Image: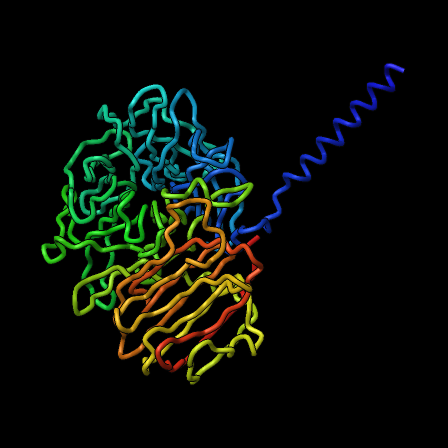
Amino acid sequence: MKNSFLLIIITALISISACAQEESAITFDEKYRPQIHFSPEKNWMNDPNGMVYHDGEYHLFYQYNPFGDKWGHMSWGHAVSKDLVSWEHLPVALYEENNVMIFSGSAVVDHNNTSGFGTAENPPMVAIYTGHHTDKELQDQRIAYSTDNGRSWTKFEGNPVIDEDLANFRDPKVLWHDETEEWIMVLALPTEYKVAFYSSPDLINWEKLSEFGPSAATGGIWECPLLFQLPIEGTDEKKWVLQVDLNPGGPAGGSGSQYFIGDFDGKTFTQDPSTEGETRWVDYGPDYYAVQSFDNVFTEEGGQIWMAWMNNWAYAQEIPTSPWRSAMTLPREIKLREYDDGIYLVRKPSPELQSLREDHSHFENEVITGESDLLKNSGVEGNVLEVKAEFELSGASTFGFKVAKGETEETIIGYNTETEELFVDRSNSGEMDFSENFTTYHTAPLKVDNNRIHLHFFLDTSSLEVFANDGRISMTERIFPSEEGEGISLFTEGGSVDLISLDVWNLKSIW
């Protein structure tokens, strides 16, 4: 009798365990789950880290909490891709231990084995990250290395490699500087609104070179700096760019990202005098932060490939998703272009994303007035879409798209001809009451190009990434439609607009 009772208990426990596992199974079609953006299987994620290309793989490491869906226990999660589109989740790469969290940082391939961690035939991948101490107010810089393409890691026994006895001193980004034949590290001094520069021959021994800042936007702490050199499109000239995130103080409230144009001589970054006193934003939406570039790879034109955290610290820990929280942006190609008013960054979605295109609808030479049924009558709908449009101004004061349309909800992407601004209005986009800091109306300055406006955007379940006028500006936004809204329409106010061309693609899931 006792054995029978025990068997019943064991069977019940197994059944309960199986039900629990079934309930917690990751399907990647959960409500609000991005279908073309990277997101963790479960739990909390923030900054992309250690992005590097090596042996045919793009590596994405990221700030990760292995134990819950809010910030804490920072470790490095890990995923890889062969095409920048589809991602394979891998085990956690670097865990918090001994009262030291693994904060943000970068990774490089040490081709010349300057560190001695690998060999000439098998150069090591080296991660450089901030150690955040939980038992005292201290942040220092540490390294780890891998000789099996990032599958396993060894923390350097001589860590930390830089310790300035500072409580706020983080986010190392490392690059190889050809002219001086040394490694250069840029680090944030967050509460001083500065970036510090260090050099090293071997990734182990570092010497401080200089500091830059404060400058431009200082409404919040500075974080996650990048230093890089890019060619100016269509010329043989190159310029150095320093990118710095800040929180709060962004253009849409909360988190934001700015950049500086100038020169770097191996020791000091000097901002171009013509740009002093102005703030240049990387993205005008609220959900583009902690930018990282892929090391060891460039575009065909010599540009960089970027990804960022698609969230905002003002409400990041409250967004209504489960069992995961946060996503990364789509990869973007970054380059410099000279305009009449100066040299600016331009950003475009990576061409690899075109592999996701499926059903295609094309329209041209249409006059749009009021709320148009053009797309509805043609059967165009969906909540995972790529849209490219060219408009010629012809009287409307405002025009654009309404997306994620349900019976009572919609998100508006529009252009105001009177203020010369692109805008995203998410005031009726769905769930918003999870945070009072979820701002709803955002703008970006945008002048017409030969009386035309070009829009290119991606809608993905709970996000929008908008690019305008061939990459002149971008806006990144999270939305959380509570309805099954798959409608999309064109609209105008105050007159008509000429739709020169429009292409809409439904996109397949990367999962």
Q: Which is nearer the eye, 326 or 440?
A: 440
User: Which one is in front, 389 or 226?
Assistant: 389
In-image side of 121 versus 341 (left or right):
right
| 266 lies left or right of 21 | left
Residue at position x 32%, y 83% from top? 394
Residue 237: quarter of image: bottom left
Q: Residue furthest top?
A: 2
Percent from the top left, x then y, of residue 178? 22, 47
- Work out whether 22 lies above or below 497: above
Q: Which quadrant of the view contains residue 168? A: top left
The percent coordinates of residue 451 (x first, y second) are 28, 79
Q: Residue at x 36, y 77 (%)?
A: 391
Task: Work out whether residue 266 or residue 9 is closer to the camera in this orientation and state it.
Answer: 9
Coloration of the structure image: rainbow
- Return the x and y of residue 23 as percentages of the image width and height: 66, 39
Q: What residue is at 50 percent from the left and 36 percent from the top?
A: 69
Identified at 43% across, 34% down, the residue is 71
| Position above or below: 420 against 12 | below
Residue 316 coordinates in the image, percent (x, y): 41, 43
How many marks the image carries: the answer is 0
Judge from the rendering whether residue 72 lies leftward or rightward of residue 12; answer left or right: left
Q: Is 11 displayed left or right of 289 in the figure?
A: right
Q: Can residue 61 be seen?
A: yes
**Can you name the residue that lies furthest to the right here?**
1
Q: Is residue 82 visible?
A: no
338 over 325 or under it: above or below: below
Q: Can you say which quadrant of the picture contains the N terminus?
A: top right
